Image (tube, helix red, strand yellow):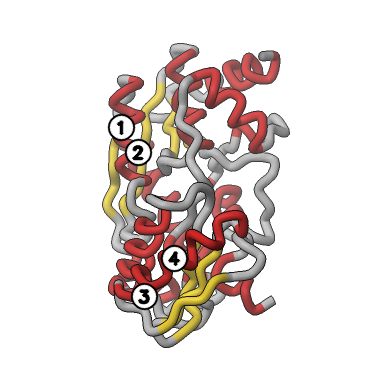
């Protein structure tokens, strides 16, 4: 509770504060803490077209439940060449564009500071977009207090915030250098949604080229996953394989390493 009170003081020092709300557990806990402690705050989400299904809806539901104003800013990432062409700097460029949109909206709403859910366990080598946060002056209260995922989830349980499996931009499912298309992302999203209804935990459907996919999921559920491969293939993939080691951080390029 000491650390929670520390977050209270930190968030209060930013009032009125804008919380960059992705719909994931971490930023959702920040929003719930603001509500719990009576901190003047708004939530800002960005609709990029790259977000997994359900994330934006989860952000809306939580904001409504907490009674906190929620603004959704539309941003077409397919208009940005580095994102569309899936260049090595895609993640940084994408994060920078998103957070610039959040900062612009926050200023329009009269907020002094923007905060996000980055925490102490997040690694810059697997999250190159973290550089953009520093450049734009985005504050990360969990990271600043040295709080990791386990502590955040403990607070989530205390405040009644749903703990969701880790999510990520759908473009991370495509290897660097291969174009990011709406059609491919729709295929990935449909496959992950299908599997998530049947298999618990983190699931990734990685595109490995030519409408081929590699599915990452908890090896404990491999048998059920094998039973579902036919249904996944019917969505439009030429071939679907199962990754032997389960989920790996690092996006679609991780399977090459």
Q: Position of residue 142 (x, y in %)?
A: 63, 33
Calculate the distance from the C-alpha at mark 4 to the C-alpha at mark 2.
Answer: 29 Å
Give me the residue at 66% from left, 65% from top.
Answer: 245
Q: Going from the N terminus, do you reach mark 1 or mark 4 first?
A: 1
**From the viewer's perspective, is 124 left or right of 140?**
right
Which numbered disc, 1 or 4, marks the residue closer to the eye? Answer: 4
Residue for point 59% across, 53% down: 130
Q: Can residue 123 be seen in this view?
A: yes
Residue at label 1? 61
Q: Which mark is residue 233?
A: 3
The residue at which mark 4 appears reads as 227
Q: Position of residue 144 (x, y in %)?
A: 68, 34
- Which one is nearer the viewer's eye here, 158 or 77? 158
108 is higher (above) or lower (below) than 40: below
Question: Helix, strand or loop at disc 2?
Answer: helix
Q: Do tag 1 and tag 2 residues touch (Cβ < 8 Å)?
A: yes
Residue that carries the numbered disc 2 in the rendered image: 58
Crowdedness near tag 2: few (<14), some (14–19) or many (≥20) residues, C-alpha within 10 Å:
some
> Mark 3, residues whose alpha carbon is within 10 Å: few (<14), some, or many (≥20)?
some
- Left or right of residue 216: residue 38: left
- Determine whether the residue tagged by mark 3 lies in a helix, strand or loop: helix
């Amino acid at each position: 509770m000491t650390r929670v009170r520390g977050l209270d003081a930190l968030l209060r020092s930013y009032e009125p504060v804008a919380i960059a709300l992705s719909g994931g557990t971490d930023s959702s806990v920040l929003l719930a803490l603001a509500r719990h402690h009576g901190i003047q705050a708004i939530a800002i989400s960005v609709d990029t077209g790259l977000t997994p299904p359900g994330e934006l809806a989860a952000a809306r539901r939580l904001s409504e439940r907490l009674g906190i104003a929620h603004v959704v800013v539309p941003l077409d990432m397919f208009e940005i060449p580095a994102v569309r062409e899936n260049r090595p700097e895609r993640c940084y460029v994408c994060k920078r564009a998103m957070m610039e949109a959040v900062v612009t909206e926050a200023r329009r709403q009269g907020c002094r500071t923007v905060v996000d859910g980055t925490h102490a366990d997040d690694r810059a080598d697997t999250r190159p977009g973290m550089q953009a946060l520093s450049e734009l002056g985005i504050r990360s209260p969990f990271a600043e207090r040295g709080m990791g995922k386990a502590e955040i989830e403990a607070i989530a349980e205390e405040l009644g915030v749903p703990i969701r499996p880790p999510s990520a931009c759908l473009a991370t499912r495509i290897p660097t250098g291969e174009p990011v298309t709406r059609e491919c992302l729709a295929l990935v999203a449909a496959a992950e949604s299908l599997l998530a209804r049947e298999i618990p935990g983190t699931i990734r459907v990685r595109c490995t080229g030519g409408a081929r996919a590699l599915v990452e999921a908890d090896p404990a559920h491999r048998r059920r996953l094998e039973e579902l491969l036919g249904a996944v293939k019917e969505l439009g993939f030429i071939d679907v394989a199962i990754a032997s080691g389960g989920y790996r951080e690092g996006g679609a390029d991780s399977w090459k390493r």
